[in-house]
Amino acid sequence: MLKHLSEYRNAELVKDLSEKIKSVSTGNWRIMEICGGQTHAIMKYNLEEFLPDNIKLLHGPGCPVCVTPASKIDLAIYASRQKDVILISYGDMLRVPGSSTDLLSVKADGCDIRTIYSPLEVISIAENNPDKTIIFFAIGFETTASPNAHLISLLDKKGIKNIFILSSMFRVPPAIEFLLSDPENKINGFLAAGHVCTVMGYEEYIPISKKFKVPIVITGFEPADILSGILETILQLEKSKYEVVNRYKRVVKQTGNISSKKVIEEVFDITDMEWRGIGIIPRSGFDLKGKYKIYSFFNLFKETESELKPDKSRTICIAGEIMQGKKTPLECKAFGNLCTPESPLGAPMVSSEGTCSAYLRYKKLN
Amino acid sequence: MCLAIPGKIISIEENSNPKMAKVSFGGAIKNICVDWVPEAKVGDYVLVHVGFALNIIDEKEAEETLKLIRDIDNTEEIC
Amino acid sequence: MTNNSKSFSCPTPINQYDKILLAHGGGGTLMHNLIESLFKKYFDNDILKQGNDSAIIDYDKNTSRYAFTTDSYVVHPIFFPGGNIGALAVYGTINDLSVSGAKPEFISVSFIIEEGFPISDLEEIVISIKNAADNTGVKIVTGDTKVIESSYKLQDNQNKLNNINANIYINTSGIGIVYEDMRISPLNCKPGDAIILSGSIAEHGIAVISAREKIEFETEIKSDVNPVNRIVEEIEKSGYGRYIKVMRDPTRGGLTSTLNEIAKAGKIGIKIYEDKIPILPEILGACELFGFDPMYVANEGKLIAVVAGNYADKILKVIKSLPEGNKAEIIGEITDTNIQKVVMRTVLGNNRVLDMISGEQLPRIC
């Protein structure tokens, strides 16, 4: 019904791909995707049902709200409690717990917290509220970093001054390198996030694939796309090949989108970032650069910069291990009993892209 | 990440800044920024994420992909 | 690069909410938990235990049974594409009576209006209420008006849309006379019964959230707010009333919540088929754009009927003979497997459990 979408949700195509995967795979392969959208699709369509038992799918830290440090969420909460502040966020972030509460609860307390679909909406909110301070909680991976960057460059062009950016934006390739350099990792191949690559291209993955000898396959999001990416990964693994291959050619080009990369480079520097549940990954994030630093959240709330410290508290939540693909939610003692979407222990249960929530929501039949 | 959906360009506001186009998603039409796809024209399908067109969908590649999958039994080579 | 991961885990959990959240009104698990753990703790009698959309009151065997229901309407924005709070308030109550097997006869209308509400808008709402009542042949026989101080936390998008600086809330209660041969209860459902859906889904929710979040569509996405009483009347007139086991109007929480309610109350399993569920292409497009699952999006003018399997085709024909039922479909059946669960066969041919979700869906980026 929707062109370029519905065709890839076709039962015949999926059946054919499934049969092909079953016929070519002999080894025990563990394939990781590092994209909340792909986790979502795999769970929603129960795609693992179409795979043979010797193929295991691992779900990496591909959910930007799950990997945003709790202390950053705490800062957003702190800011929204200040007088005359409007906090703007993408919907995904609202239910993710900080250290003690979440933005949705704070909104119920009466704070002015608004969700948007597109960062361009931030401009009209700012223009309609010139006497308020607008905080934009700019989250995402590279796909969203680029529209966020575009917004920030527009703010500069339009001379809008009452907006401040609390940024929590991540880069995928350093995370892949990080996961692969863990000696305990059992990842045989990667599905690279197709929409990140639409923006950034996939040149960055080539040296990673060579260094760690893992196939990396650029993969889309619909059932046939995902199975196609898995098939390509298995075909390589069966032949001990490790290459970067594009299985999402209808939108991804090797060099990505030049204009959108350009705006990222203009607005953001690459920085070290803390990933919630994992730790600091060098050069794995974006932050404002040059003239755009005037929009930094910390210009407004200088006193809070020291609040950004790594989470050290220990609970029974094993979110870190889940996001690194070391464990599945089913191996968590709290899954589905102490930890549910209504009372989550960690971010992957709250965010709809989180592995735990996806496992629970798209429950398999017994 | 990330949720991005194909939509068809219905019209383009050439003189807008940022450059905007009306894009249809099955009939739901939304204003989308097309600054990053300057070569896009009316009738093209674009991939849209948070109100931005990320790339034009290559119709030829789309056909090839479907053909490749439909012909999957004959696929042995790795591209 | 070495991996220095210490596997920091997620911080303190958020368990019980001590304040009411918006999600408590969302039709999902939070709302159901509130009802079960608070209201049902104190409100308890045989009539309440029926658990239908209206209470069926059977005074004595010589007179008709009455159906009695109440509902409050707090929709924002007050005016949305396809309708307004007035029409919604009347049709919602009429529908609750209708799906309980009753002919709606009388309603009450009570207003709680914040100081500052424009009288012209109030008049427009009142006219909608009158039109809705006339359209369905019900009499408005009593009412109430209260005015309170404005506590409106104005969001500029609602302001722009409606130019209103104050809220209005409407409660309607309704009485109907239950059709002689209609005995509606989830406990009547038996394996082999068919499930009929009267039309396409997700329109109301998408229309309202688009208007509320000021997500503009250039083609109007309209709510499906509409009465279903004529559908029930036609079924009754055709002599098939006795073959109706249970009916519901799937409102908040979408089709999924309603089916889960039936499955849990009826202690039976439900199997539905994704490819049978009607949805308009523009609604599907909007759902895809925001990342909404249409199965969880609110409706306001639709009906689900569980009917005796051997009369399903005949009843379907009756429903389809009306304009408001012309997209009706048999979407599934009652089963004796997966008791108290709703299972959907996806377009890919595999099965997925449809659970209740915990709160409202929010537009997501990921």
Image (tube, rainbow, N blue to C red):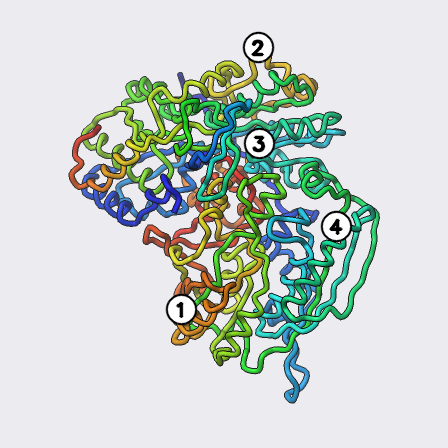
Q: Are marks 1 and 2 in contact (CB under 8 Å)?
A: no
Relative vertical location of residue C112 with respect to residue B60 in this rendering, above or below: below
Q: Position of residue A245 (x, y in %)?
A: 28, 27
Mark 2 element type:
helix
Mark 1 element type:
loop
Image quadrant of residue C331?
Answer: bottom left
Q: Position of residue A243 (x, y in %)?
A: 26, 24
Relative vertical location of residue C167 with respect to residue A87 in this rendering, above or below: below
Mark 4 neighbour class, 10 Å CA radius: few under 14, some 14 to 19, many 20 or more: some
Q: In the rendered structure, which disc, 3 or 2, sits on the residue that comes first in sequence? A: 2
Q: In the rendered structure, which disc, 4 or 1, sits on the residue that comes first in sequence? A: 4
What residue is shown with label 2?
Answer: A290
In the rendered structure, the residue with mark 1 lies on which chain? C
In the orientation shown, which residue stands out farthest toward the bottom? C62
Judging depth in this view, the residue of A358 and A197 nearest the camera is A197
Q: In the image, which disc is placed on residue C336?
A: 1
Q: Are marks 3 and 1 in contact (CB under 8 Å)?
A: no
Q: Are marks 4 and 1 in contact (CB under 8 Å)?
A: no
Same chain check for tags 3 and 1: no
Q: Amino acid at mark 1?
A: Asp
In the rendered structure, the residue with mark 2 lies on which chain? A
